[in-house]
Every structure is written in C-alpha cells, then in structure tokens.
Amino acid sequence: MGIAGGIAVSLETWADALADEVKAGRARAVGVSNCDAGQTGCAHAALTARGVLLACNEVEYSLLNRGPERSGLVTTCRELGVTLIAYRPLAMGMLTGKYSPEQPPRGLQFCKAYLAKIAPLIASKV
C-alpha cells in the first residue's frame, strides 16, 4: 500500500502502473523498496501477470539489522529471483570500526550501550 496525492493506493495498482512504464519503454526494470516478504510476493505476482520482472527490493540490511533474514524476506527474494539490495549495510558507519563508546559519532545520538554492543562485531573483522 502506498500514498499518492493523499490517497491510499494498493500495491497491485502501483505494480500495474510500473508495468505500463516498462511496456511503454520508459523503464527497463521494476524495483521496490522496503517491501516485506508478502508485499514482495504480491508485487512479483502482479508484475508477472503483465509479463514484467520484479528486479529488486531495497531494504535496510546489515549485521546490526538482520530482520530480512528473520522475516523470510531473503528466502522469498531468492525463491522469486528478486535481487535483494541492502541499504545502510555498514549501519550508518557503526560497523566501520571508527566508533566506540569512547569515541561516538558526532551529531548522531547513539547510547554507549548500543556502541558497546557492536564492539564484538568490529573486533572479529578479518
């Protein structure tokens, strides 16, 4: 479900409009963002019915946010042939090794407990 001009629009309606763009030659592929497993399946089915491939789903995914694995989204994308694209794969820089409880990022509000939680991930980097 999305909002267009203040009106709720179904995922099928969005998919149909995007398929129209592919069929008209104004787009080569269709991708979605932040769709869960069910929404990904729905978009895939709606596009497949029009002969258009769902190319990708972009979601927040990192070692600190493994929700796409736990929710079944990774499996759904794999089964449907949809590429899963991670945004914030370095968790807004938290996984770079640059920050710690003693050296927090400027301008971002992260509690020391959160920063301490990432320490084992940083320490285990290869």
Image (tube, helix red, strand yellow):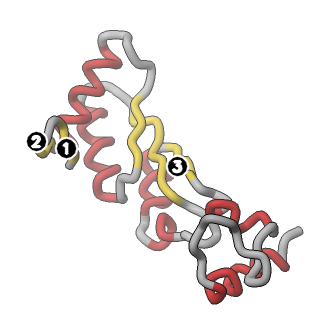
Report the number of discs. 3
Q: Residue furthest right?
A: 126
Q: Which residue is mark 2?
A: 7
Q: Residue furthest bottom?
A: 113
Q: Which mark is residue 84?
A: 3
* Residue 75 drawn at (x, y percent): 47, 60
Q: Earlier in the sequence, mark 3 or mark 2?
A: 2
Which of 45/5 is in front? 5
Q: Which mark is residue 3?
A: 1
Q: Which mark is residue 14?
A: none
Tell me if 7 is positioned left or right of 33 in this view. Answer: left
Q: Are marks 1 and 2 in contact (CB under 8 Å)?
A: yes
**Which amino acid, mark 1?**
Ile
**Which amino acid, mark 3?**
Leu
Q: Secondary structure at mark 1?
A: strand
> Where on the picture, by quarter, is residue 123?
bottom right
